[in-house]
Image (cartoon, coloured by chain):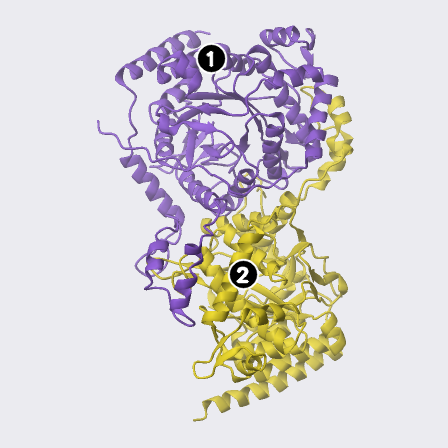
Chain colours: A purple, B yellow
Amino acid sequence: MNHSETPPLEPIEPKYRVRILTDQQLERLKSATLHILQEVGIQCPSDRALRIYAEHGAQVDQESQIVRLPSDVVLDAISHAPRFYTMGARLPEFDLHLDGSAFYCATDGCGVETVDFKTRQRRASVKADVAEMARVADYLSSIGFYWPVVSAQDHPSAAPLHELDASFNNTVKHVQTETVMDETMARYAVEMATVIAGDAETLRERPPLSSLVCTIAPLAQDKGGMESALVFAEAGLPVGFMSMANTGSTAPATLAGTVAAADAEIVAALTLIQMAYPGAPVYHSLMPGIMHPRTGAYLGTAWEGELLYAVGVELAHAWGVPTLAGVFGTDAQVPGWQQAAESGSSLLLCALCGADTGSGLGLLESCTLLYPEAVVLDTDIYHRVRIDVAGLDTSSEALALDVIKDVGPRGHFLRESHTRDHVRQREFSDLVDQPQPDGSYRDPIEVAREKTARILEDHQPQPLEEAQRAEMERILGAAEGELGNT
Amino acid sequence: MASETPDIIPFASPFTGGLLSSAQLETLQEGTLRLLDEVGVHIPSRQALTIFADHEASVDWDRQIVRIPPHLVRKAMSTAPRSFVLGGRDERFDLTLDGSCSYLCTDGTGVHVVDLETREMRPSRKEDVAMTARVCDALPMVSFFWPPVSAQDCGSTAPLHQCHAALTNTLKHVRGGMTVPPGLAAYAVEMATVVAGSALERRRRPPICANICTIAPLAHDRDGIETALVYAEAGIPTSFMAMPTMGSTAPATPLGALVVGDAEVVSGMVLLQLAHPGAPVFHSIITSLMHPRTGGYIGEVSAPVTVMAVQLAHAWGVPSLGGGSTSTDSPIIDWHAGSDAGRGTALIPLLGGEICGYMGLTDGSMVLYPEKIILDHELCQIAYEKLGGFEFDETDMALNVIRDVGPRGHFLAQEHTRRRIRDFRLSSVLHRRDSDGGVHDPAQMALAEFKRIYQTHRPQPLPPRVQSELDRILAAAERQGAQTQGDAHEP
């Protein structure tokens, strides 16, 4: 089968930086985290994790499963975590070098419903959606790595592994799973990643898979999630921890209180990984929401909440680890004004704060509903932000004084060769300002649907080798056999 | 009984770091000085050219081109104030333009309105200016009212009617001065004097400011520049706005467009300083891009261009009208309009600029959708709340509350939650759900909110004496306007 080239990545490379918090404020937040971990502790229902905590100087109450972490223990453990590392891809040119100079974004993930691209009907998500969207993500230069965007609900016994199978078969880019939540499943996932990498050494050097585990707010961990993370870390695959503390319900009704509680959850988990596997690549992800005070709903994009995504970037760096920042995301239910209005602002701010990675393109309705064309729409916003922070050419050629002099007052620049050369260097959106015969512009959502259809029709990324495909199927079969019976 | 006008909310810009180094800014300014000295600016006004000639600029009377030597530019700009006040009807609506914060404004000046009731698009009228002024009076993020549309039912004196409709319907500062036949500019000044109470007060806290567009590249309009001289003499703060379009009326590079625009704006400001040293002036460059296939206007350009325009203004020692914008090229309120407004509001605290925001218009500032004022205002308010900086203290960190709740608890029953959750504002247009859990269309919610304000908000009226004085001024202006128009038609 002929395959198509995957277009090169276009990461966001900010030439400008902003700071949200002062060093002093960051230190106060870190002190609050250390205080919470020492005085209140976190609840951890995993015997394996409790043992590791206890062996490394934590005070563990076996009955309540509460772990209290002295500050020096936390600081010592986390000092081993690398600030920079590489997240590998199937093809080396798509490796993501987290070195502080570039910001790579992923699709959103783990949605549960899809608005079917052909029938336009809303339905439960299936494995084929993960595969199709992996191809779309593979094509888009905005997507640095792929989160299985929805859940493979047609494979209930081993859905996370089917999501990985669909992903690895349909993109050459790095894949990050956010659904592998128990130890057995994690071992199969690592096996799949080894098949992609080729051998255990390459797996460590250029890991094609990483994992994200959510903590439980307030101040708790999930048994399966933590045990899965330990398996990933043992194999050298990056693992990150995300707190989605909700201001008012699972976190205090103040932003600073939410940050302190959420950061404590994340840092407790990072500490465990570094205790078990010092130097293992890890990342920090602060994605709180705000409780709608009337309905109790989780609002991911409302009010001051989004500022906290950028605060999360600064906190991650203050702890000396990379970040997975909250970008995009909308509470809107259909693509349109609200979706677009809510989408770009956190991306811009996180880029200017120096975020390493971020996720969130393509889902609506608070990260639960996939419109396939939404990832193309979000890509347009992504590129605007990329251009916004990319700096400007301030050379004398760009200043163009001689051209202006030649044209003079009340002249025009249409026939200058300088214009011809430079107008081609300007980047234009391929969604907005698309003219149609009557002189008006086309609806960008319609253009995005056409573009999505074109990608789905035409783009076939380089497939896995036959042997790799067979091996993946064998792993899936074994996993189904084992997990289906448990 | 009159309604209370809420206090305005200026937008501090905690993140503006400045993108250009001082050396780069100097290079740009040197470029402007070279263009003004070597190429010059076309000004078809004998009055303006005479002022330049009197100050030893080089005037080519045949070609109507003035070339201004660098020392004269620098000397003239040295008398322009860095900071001044735009007055509101009460002092609490005064805007101090000193760079410490941004004041948000409405967009202007469109020519079509999507009618509030019929929802049909029609030419704009004076009543539309009055309607929007009244609604914006109730919106705290609007600090500066620029009539969003023109009073096309008022003939040659339309700009004066726009000024009148605004001054009589809002307590906020009004961008009431525009290009008019120079003979009519004095009537705008007179309206400002009457509203301010005296000529002295008009200079101290001018209730209106003026905007004059330049012509790209490197030219001024006769009426515009002569009108500006009238405003400057009266102490009405005046901005020159350059709108260079990359590829057609400016080079196809952002920096080239900036330097063309800067030369136009600076030439106007220099003229006003030569004629009336110390006159309050401000600087505005709105760059755009020519659509390479259609030649159409693309209003959206990258953020660094906008922030550099702001920095250039400050480098010349004057305030800037620029910065983040909610305006859109989209003809309707759709995905494109949302993406423009969302990005624009996120940029407000990053780009700075004393006046920015530009709420209410679509289609490249041509069409007023009343509900877009509410939508844009909402996004500005969200941006203000979430991007206004992050201050906290020990009580905000709520460590005792976290300890009391402990792992796997919840915060719903905490007294701290009940108290502090009220700090979060509920949006009137976003995240509103119906009884089935569906989200209401924000544009529909915004339209209802616009109508609600329009029906209920009645700002403090001007004293009857002032109102009748304004009517008298308008009547006199109309007589002169009719006469001027008659003269113009004579062979």
Mark pair 1, 2: CA separation = 57 Å
For label 1, the crowd category at 10 Å Cα-Cα, with few meaning under 14, some 14 to 19 and many 20 or more, is many
Corner quadrant of residue A397: bottom left
Which amino acid does the dot numbered 1 rest on? Ala
Badge 2 element:
helix
In percent of width and height, residue B193 lies at: 71, 77
Labels 1, 2: one chain: no
Corner quadrant of residue A206: top left
For label 2, the crowd category at 10 Å Cα-Cα, with few meaning under 14, some 14 to 19 and many 20 or more, is some
Mark 2 — on which chain does it sit? Answer: B
Labels 1 and 2 touching (C-beta < 8 A): no
Badge 1 element:
loop
Which amino acid does the dot numbered 2 rest on? Gln
Mark 1 — on which chain does it sit? Answer: A
Say if residue A189 shows up in the picture.
yes
Residue at 63%, 8% in the rendered image: A50
In percent of width and height, residue B292 lies at: 34, 57
Seen in the picture, residue B192 relative to A17 is either above or below; the reply is: below
The disc placed on residue B29 is 2
**Residue sticking out furthest to the left:** A1
Q: Quadrant of the C terminus of chain B?
A: bottom left
**Residue sticking out furthest to the bottom:** B491
Q: Is residue A194 left or right of residue B460?
A: left
Q: Is residue A171 left or right of residue B37?
A: left
Q: Which residue is mark 1?
A: A235
Say if residue B127 shows up in the picture.
no
